[in-house]
Image: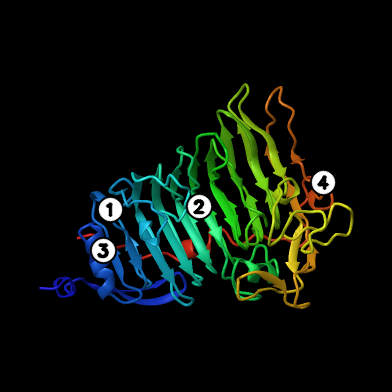
Amino acid sequence: MGIFHALCRSAIVVWIWSGFSALGTVYHSDGSAASVQGLHNQLLNGDTITLPAGTFTWTTGVNFTKAINVVGAGIGRTTINDNVPKNGTQASVLWRFDVAKGKSIDISGFTVHGQAQDTQGWQLGTLAIRGSSHAVRVHNIQMVSPGTLGILFTGALWGVVDHSDFRCANGKIAIYVQHNNWPGASGSFGDGSWYDSTQLGSGKGIYVEDCTFTGDGRGGSPCIDGYSGGRLVFRHNTVTNNNVGWHGTEGDRNQGTRTFEVYQNTFSSNVLMARCVQLRGGTGVVWGNTVHGTGGPTGYVDFVTVLNFRSFTSYGAPWFSPPGSVWDGNSNPNGYLLIGQIGAGKEADPVLRNGNGDPYNGTTGAPGWPHCAREPAYVWSNNWTPVPNNRGFYIGVQATPQISIGRDVINNGSTPKPGYTPYVYPHPLVTGGNPTISHT
């Protein structure tokens, strides 16, 4: 008897979930990769696969090409040891999801322990979710020392990661947000996201809320990173021995992080860390955070560090390094306003690509500055406890003459950014509710 026929006895359930009316069937796997992939291959969009309680070691991943929900028995009850070889191919990812616009997925209820290690820095994700869905939810999961990046979001996704625990004391990034295929301009490399308006507080992007993050205090592997037009929101989280930060427009074809919102989080460190928030590009807000050490020489030397890698690194094509790059505004001898720098906003001209993937200004037809708007980042109402006997800065600029406090980053005291309203909390995908799934 085939897998599908053997499991046809599963109850059909109907629910209204995350704003979508869904008719789906629940199928129970045996917890193995083969069982989950086999079920997926025979199911329909909106169906659910459960994982039973127990510990399972996977040496092959699963490729989800349909909008299938995956629900374990709970954190610490369903445990997957990720021993899928991290060889730089898509097959090295534990779970891959491709979710189209108009579809939704819910992923929850399990712990992942990393075994196979990504020694080459491929960063393809333990969970890799791509597509253009506006209803992706990952919640109530735990990652313990993942062998590679925890969750990678790519494409043009909107959604939320909530009520999850990331224990990345092994130097791995927990969550990485890239909106490389945001509609508009070239539709790749984040160009579309930079050609679109900023839209802070809109719900458009990836939200991370009510999660816990534990690092090793070394820095360089933040709780959340962004690149390629990424639009990210990090709020109401608890962070220990780690920080947050994201890429700007730097050494490869991708444009940098587009927008960020970091608010009402608690950061603490029992070791000495250089910074809490690192801003390398884009625009956004940082407000209402509590940041402290545990006594003595512990905590965060700087609250916010602002920098631009192109300012102190010799890069070649396509963007080159300032001053003098045709991709920068060059309004002063330092090259200001740099493409993608902190305080840069919407690009008035679309960045397109030629047959080789090289960028050019879609208005002029040649490589050239896309006339970025000036949209400073705002910082206000943060409770940062300086490290004793360590000279630090509430907002510090590192080796970047193109960045000016008061112009590109505004210390606004206790006053919010004019016109800014945060998105509803909790996220509607959280409050919309999810069905209770029986694992029997």
Which class describes the residues within 10 Å of circle 1: few (<14), some (14-19), or many (20+)? Answer: some
Which image quadrant: the N terminus? Answer: bottom left
CA distance for labels 1 and 2: 22 Å
For disc 2, the marked residue is 175
Q: Mark 2 is on which residue type? A: Ile
Proximity of marks 4 and 3: CB atoms separated by less than 8 Å: no
Q: Mark 1 is on which residue type? A: Thr
Kindly state the secondary structure of the residue where label 4 is placed. loop
Q: Mark 4 is on which residue type? A: Pro
Kindly state the secondary structure of the residue where label 1 is placed. loop
Q: Give the image quarter of residue 12.
A: bottom left
Proximity of marks 4 and 1: CB atoms separated by less than 8 Å: no
Q: Residue at x 49, y 76 (%)?
A: 101
Proximity of marks 2 and 3: CB atoms separated by less than 8 Å: no
Q: Give the image quarter of residue 317.
A: bottom right
**Way the structure is coloured:** rainbow
Viewer-side label of 4, 3: 4
> As drawn, which residue projects farthest toward the right?
332
**Is there any visible trace of residue 288 in the rendered image?**
no
Kindly state the secondary structure of the residue where label 3 is placed. helix
For disc 4, the marked residue is 401
For disc 1, the marked residue is 59
Residue 253 in the image: x percent, y percent?
A: 63, 62
Say whether disc 4 or disc 3 marks the residue closer to the N-terminus.
3
